[in-house]
Image (spheres, rainbow, N blue to C red):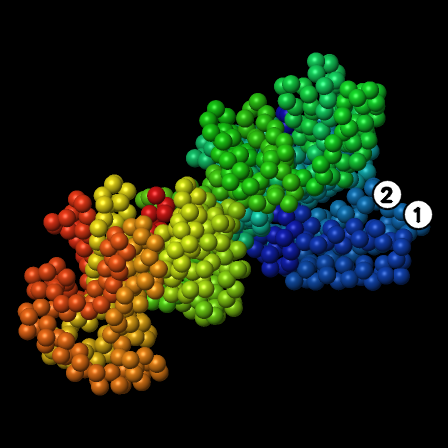
Amino acid sequence: MESSAPASANWRVHKFGGTSLADPARIRHVADLLGARTPPVAVVVSAMSGVTDRLLALAEKAHTDADGLADRLQSLRDDQRAVVTDLLDGDAAASVLRTLDQDLDDLADVLRATRLMGTAPDTTRDLVAGYGELWSARVLGGVLRDRGLSAAVCDAREVLVVTHEEMGPVVDWDATQERFADWRAAHDAPDTIVATGFIATTPDGVPTTLGRNGSDHSAALFAALLEAEALTIWTDTDGVMSADPQYVPDARRLDGLSYEEAMEMAYFGAGVIHPRTLSPAVEHEIPITIRNTFAPDRPGTRIHLNDDGASVVKGFSTIDDVALLNLEGSGMIGVPGIARRLFDALEDEGVSVILISQGSSEHSICFAVPQAQAEVAREAAEHAFYAELDRGQLRTVELVPNCSILAVVGDQMAGTPGVAATFFGALGEASVNVRAVAQGSSERNISAVVDRDDARRALRAAHAGFYLSKRTLSIGVIGAGNVGAALLDQIRTEAGRLRDQQDIDLRVRGIAASSRMLRAEQRLDLETWRADLSAGEATDLDAFVDHVQTDYHPHTVIVDCTASAPIARRYGDWLERGIHVVTPNKKANTDTWETYQALQTASQGPGPQYLYETTVGAGLPILQTLNSLTETGDQVHRVEGILSGTLSYLFNAFDGDRPFSAILRQAKDEGFTEPDPRDDLSGMDVARKVVILAREMGVPLELEEVSVDGLVPGPLRDGSVEAFLDRLPEHDADMTKLLRDAQAENKVLRFVGGVTRDGDASVRLRRYPADHAFARINHTDNIVRFQTDRYDETPLIVQGPGAGPQVTAAGVFADLLRLMS
């Protein structure tokens, strides 16, 4: 198109929608944005939010609700006058108000005529609907003039000439260019043009509209008329998103799109753009930017000729309410004209075909249509092939209702191997059945038909397959006590580094304590989780786990930082659902041998993993070492060690200078013991660790088979913790005697658990010479001694800190990272 009207090379066009102009405050904001732009600027405006709907309602009800018509008109008049008087004053306000009143008087006349006719024809509806844009343009023009700009208001009905055809409105460019040239000549070269969107006129001078996304289309048309440098469409979103953020929480703003990518995405429902909007800009190679009116500092999405962004796939969209029809039969093979007959029949009935798929065998043609036209399409196909169906050459036309079409779009998909594999692999992992597939030779779009009920899951899964790291982990932490809190703090500290350096994306999406829980769609704020949890919702573990496991995260893990047996009993169900389990909780692995075996079986292979290194030795690699020995063929004969950091601390500190009861009370105060120290002194914690070691060796040991000599005096086994601590000094003499007897032999006391390959397992206080490895430990050290075929005369030793929440949490964290590898 060659413009006959004088045009400046530096015109920029801006379009503002109804939400951007919803009230006086927002109109002022738009004026601020425009005032910061260097002229010349053209602005295309929609009606204020809700005004077009109110106008159309007036037209619809004019002949059915005459009594209420005057009230609704007056309400509309009052609202519009309030906007004008809020934004303008003096002569400027008076001028706009006079025009507004004249418009509303004319509107009242039109509605009276409509009432008399008993119907509202399309021409009347178009005339009535267009007033909202006029009112927005006049008010904004007045505000800009008040700010010193030479702003002229352009009624697009004076410029844009369109005819309505089957494919939509078609612009009469010759007439439009001529009218625009005349309009510009009559307005003394303003530096700002405020034009109405949505409305136009027919060649006969009848007011009309541009239909869906009409204001965007108007903006593109004015940009073409002005040979503008750029078109900016201001909306209430940050730009074009990689998917609908209502359905895909991880949807991202796209920096750029090519025209072709934008058209593909728009066809499949991306709401901020429409192919008709783009066509004038594409023809004139005008870049389009989608930006957020309410966050103007954000860059938005730029649409132009090409975009060489890093993403092979740009976006995902769906078309819902689709039906799939299949015409199938041996009579189609090698017969020319089958497709023509089918689609001619559909065209005759006005059926829009959205997707077509045909196998090379020519045995079937599969096509998708809007759900509302499904029965019409089937009847048309059956009528067109009545003879073939009657002779059995074709089968009955199969109709599959309630489908959706999922499309993956990207210019760089062309020639890139593996895109389809990633797409369909993601759908397969999400258990989404694909009913039909279509791909054009441009390779810019792959479309799949899925059941409507699977559409959201399919969209999320496909988006995750391309946009999320393969090492993205949805994490739910159960237990926010010492270990759980330390773990969350460690994740907070390291998550950024892991994401940037190792492509490991740890997303804590849920935290559950005994009474309260927190959930987040993307990730919780680990800076404020303590305060947030105290105000969280009531804990519901089923709802918690359902939330953490999504169909759009590659992996889900539940981290159980409790010592709860009921929670441990849920591990099997979680593993069966495909959820990884990481835990320092010993209760599951020390339940029955059958339970232990079931968990091992459930976590074998490439599926969900069950990691529990911290159940023995906190952060020490004790189970890893044992498994490495057995997996490499070494025969393990005996494993024994100091397996309680608490008891290690107690007997390191117990040298006779202070009573044992005083050392225990100090250890409890410093957090080295369980809330009830009897849980440590009983030896049952060590016994559980011995059972786990035995089972990892392949010995089917049960907890009751471990011989345990605990340290809790019989009379103190019951009662409160404080009563126990108060009465424990009564038994200090017995503990001191044990110590003195050991010292007399130049030995030390150590609380040790062990198991042999034959299943002989015990937990008790033992004496060791000063040069024994178990005697040379520090503070809360754990130490484990492996006696094997390879390590016989000199057993293998693993030693290090074995108590404290930080150490245990670090071990759990290590299991999480091991899971990601």
Residue drawn at the location 11% of the way across and 79% of the way down: 657
* Residue 755 left/right relative to 4: left
Image: 13 above or below 622? above
Image coordinates of residue 391 in percent, x first then y, are 82, 20
Residue drawn at the location 68% of the way across and 60% of the way down: 83
* Residue 80 left/right relative to 726: right
Can residue 576 be seen in the rendering of this structure? yes
Per the image, label 1 sits on a secondary structure element best described as: helix
Per the image, label 2 sits on a secondary structure element best described as: loop
Q: In the rendered view of the protein, which quadrant contains the C terminus?
A: top left
Image quarter for residue 98?
A: bottom right
Q: Are marks 1 and 2 in contact (CB under 8 Å)?
A: yes
As drawn, the label of residue 411 is none
Report which residue position mark 2 lands on: 121
Label 2 CA crowd tier, 10 Å (few <14, some 14–19, many 20+): few
Report which residue position mark 1 lands on: 117
Residue drawn at the location 76% of the way across and 40% of the way down: 372
Residue drawn at the location 50% of the way across and 57% of the way down: 545
| Nearest the eye: 733 or 702 | 702
Image coordinates of residue 58 in percent, x first then y, are 82, 54
| Nearest the eye: 811 or 676 | 676
Image coordinates of residue 743 in percent, x first then y, are 8, 73
The amino acid type found where label 2 is placed reads Pro
